[in-house]
Amino acid sequence: MVQPGKNRLLKTPLILAGAAVALGILIYFFANFREERAVQKCFEALQQGDLEAAYQIWGPTEQYTFKDFLQDWGEDGYYGKVRYFKIVESESQGSGVIVRVQINNLARPIAFWVEREDRSIGFSPTDL
């Protein structure tokens, strides 16, 4: 026969272990949420044709000017108008996150680098 006090002692570690597992799952699925959200906002602006807003979210730099951005994302740009996009996956690496995005009907998702500190976006130097 189990004494009432011992039953309570068994429940506490089980509850704590369950909470730790649940917290771990939440951290795993939402660790890159802010970086994915920055990419999502940028692509929503591209979808709506607001290239200036998308470029501001992207993070203007001297190395990648608005003119360069238009050559990639403008109506006649390399990627053209974004009609469809879906964030496929993300992975933390060093000071940033690589976010892969399926765009329009391209064969492969494109990898983007999002810096954690300021959530500026760029093309990823490495793929997942």
Image (spheres, rainbow, N blue to C red):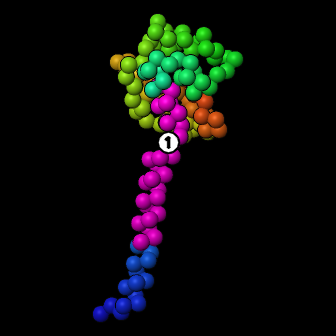
- Tell me: residue 30, above or below residue 14: above
Q: Position of residue 85 (x, y in %)?
A: 39, 25
Does the magenta portion include 29? Answer: yes
Relative vertical location of residue 32 with respect to residue 68 in this rendering, above or below: below
Residue at horizontal 64 percent and vertical 22 percent from the top:
60
Q: Is residue 126 visible?
A: no
Residue 38 left/right relative to 104:
right
SS assignment at label 1? helix
Q: From this viewpoint, which residue is outermost toward the right?
A: 62
> Magenta includes 121?
no
Residue 4 visible to an observer of this rendering? yes
Q: Camera-side residue: 24 or 45? A: 45
Span colored in magenta = 15-43
Q: Residue at x 51, y 27 (%)?
A: 42
Quadrant where the N terminus sits is bottom left
Give the camera-side residue of 78 and 46: 46
For disc 1, the marked residue is 33
Give coordinates of residue 69: x percent, y percent. 57, 15
Whole-percent x and y of residue 63? 67, 17
Residue 6 in the image: above or below residue 90: below
What amino acid type is highlighted by mark number 1?
Phe
Residue 57 point in image, percent of width and height: 57, 27
Asked which quadrant contains residue 6, the reply is bottom left
Seen in the picture, residue 39 relative to 74 is either above or below; the reply is below
| Residue in the image at 47% along x and 20% along y | 46
Q: Main secondary structure of the magenta part?
A: helix
